[in-house]
Amino acid sequence: MTKPQADGTQKPLSHQANSATEADVANPTNPNRQYHFRIRENGALVFRINPANRQRRIEMQQIAVANTKRGDFKAVQDHALTDDDRTAIQNWLTDRQEHLQERKYRDAEDLIDRLSMTAQWVQSEAVATQLDALSDRLIFAMHDLRTVLVRKMGQRNSQGGASKD
């Protein structure tokens, strides 16, 4: 399975599911069998999964907190992270940051569709009370977006077409 990239190319899906079932944990070839990443606003809580118990229950021990904005992580309490822990968490952080950037791009693509659909709704279905409630906010949001786009285009053109992050 592939996903479209901003440049129009296709990339294989590498973002793994971030939770493990008993079957996943029991499968030694599954890369997520040892860890679970409980996603939160700015990262994740990292758990090590211990499937080896007599009741065949999945046991999870929190070992770290990962921060996607800063791209770092730290062990919780006095837990010492192994090299495998560090590698797994760093790999997850890299994949997650890439996933979040791709999501932002998809959101912008979706916004284009939403704006077109909103224009059609305003033209064909909206009543005066709906327009009164939304018009100013829509105009301000679109003006703000236009201002940022024009500024970014100007910066890019003044740099000879090079994009600036």
Image (cartoon, helix red, strand yellow):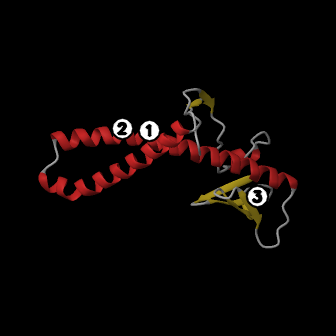
Q: Please, which residue is most extreme toward the top here?
A: 9
- Which residue is tagged 2? 113
* Residue in the image at 77% along x and 50% along y: 88
Q: In which quarter of the image is the N terminus?
A: top right
- Which residue is tagged 1? 109
* Residue in the image at 84% along x and 51% along y: 84
SS at circle 2: helix
SS at circle 1: helix
Q: Do the CB atoms of the residues marked 1 and 3 lie less than 8 Å apart?
A: no
- Please give the label number shown on residue 48: 3
Q: Do the CB atoms of the residues marked 2 and 1 lie less than 8 Å apart?
A: yes
Is residue 49 visible from the viewing direction of this image?
A: yes
Amino acid residing under circle 3: Arg
- Please give the label number shown on residue 135: none
Amino acid residing under circle 2: Asp
Find residue 60 and report its horizontal and vertical position in percent. 72, 61
Q: Counting residues from the N terminus, which is met first, the one under dot 1 or under dot 3?
A: 3
Is residue 58 visible from the viewing direction of this image?
A: no
Closer to us: mark 1 or mark 3?
1
Q: Please, which residue is most extreme toward the left here?
A: 128
Find residue 14 and report its horizontal and vertical position in percent. 66, 37
Tally of marks: 3
Gap between marks 1 and 3 measured at Cα = 37 Å
